[in-house]
Amino acid sequence: MEVIDDRNFLTKLCGEKKPEDCGITSLEEINNTLENLIPPFSKRGTEIDEFCVLSVDSITDFEGIVKIISLNIIPPGKKILTRARRHIVIADVLPRVVVPIILRVENESYILLAGQNRVTLGGKYTIEVYRGSVPHNTDENNYGKTLVNRKLNLIDDLFDLIEVRNLGTYWNNSGNSGTSSPIQALFYVSKKNITLSDLKKQLKVNYKYDADPISGPPLPLNSPILKKLSEVLERLSDVTDLTTNNEAYINDLFSITALAALKESLIKKPLPF
């Protein structure tokens, strides 16, 4: 197969017009524009089975959490300008983390899950592994702890953190987005005897609707869901039962992946208590 360099490819694509007159910019300029948002393009993509990137159309910021990038591209197939179209890429701005939280209470191990409404799921009530964004410049070893302090700021009054366990990085590539999220399990032991019902009441944080954070994602009202760790890892149906009130379920790949990673980790390295 003949390999065409970028200059010859653009000459063939644009004919007598200059690339800039066809709305095409250099690969270097494209990568400089998208620096720190997505991995750089190693090539433009000129082969029949490749996406061909032409230029960056726009970058829109959403609350400092993500940026929506509009790229001008030619999809796989014949490389002619009449086939050019826009392609949307969602890029993270804030670091993200998925945090399985394991609590030791009355000689039993529980996993702390979040029950909350998700606007992207039509307002349905979901049960999920805690996850979210953390501020810029947060030390990677403190991603999980920082998220917990942000979403469950009462947990330190009730528990001692005895281990932070890194479970790897989950790369979710949907085609429109590429989200890289480390999974970090936190293991806590209760400071005193406490019943599960009292624990749920004390862990719930009632955020005021008029006290949203100045920057970063909002903090939705959430209910702490406590399930025995052994049951959750043995059968996900314990937390995916659609017969429960409000259609509570785990249905997102972040939660499922985090639980799978936790289970694999515990096979190799037992609970720290």
Image (cartoon, rainbow, N blue to C red):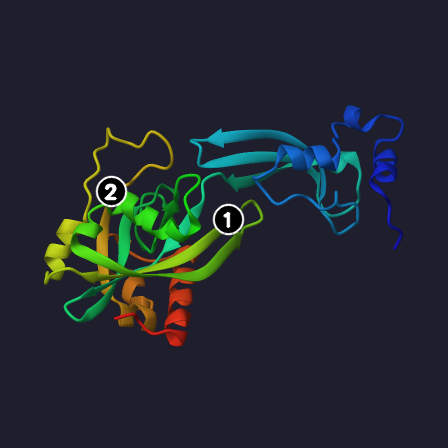
The residue at 38%/73% (across/down) is: 269
Query: Left or right: 142 with respect to 171?
Result: left
Few, some or many residues within 10 Å of mark 2 (<14, 14–19, 20+): some
Query: Left or right: 269 with respect to 108?
Result: right
Q: Amino acid at mark 1?
A: Thr
Q: Amino acid at mark 2?
A: Leu
Q: Residue 57's quadrant in the figure?
A: top right
Few, some or many residues within 10 Å of mark 1 (<14, 14–19, 20+): some
Residue, disc 2? 221
Q: Residue 107's quadrant in the figure?
A: bottom left
From mark 2 to mark 1, how far is it between C-alphas? 24 Å
- The circle on residue 179 is 1
Q: Is residue 241 visible?
A: no
Q: Is residue 62 visible?
A: yes
Q: Position of residue 190 (x, y in %)?
A: 17, 61
Which of the pair 163/121 is nearer the observer?
A: 163
Which of the pair 90/146 is nearer the observer?
A: 146
The residue at 21%/34% (across/down) is: 208
Q: Secondary structure at mark 2?
A: loop
Residue 91 vs 15, above or below: the answer is: below
Which mark is in front, 2 or 1?
Answer: 1
Q: Which badge, 2 or 1, is on the more N-terminal residue? A: 1
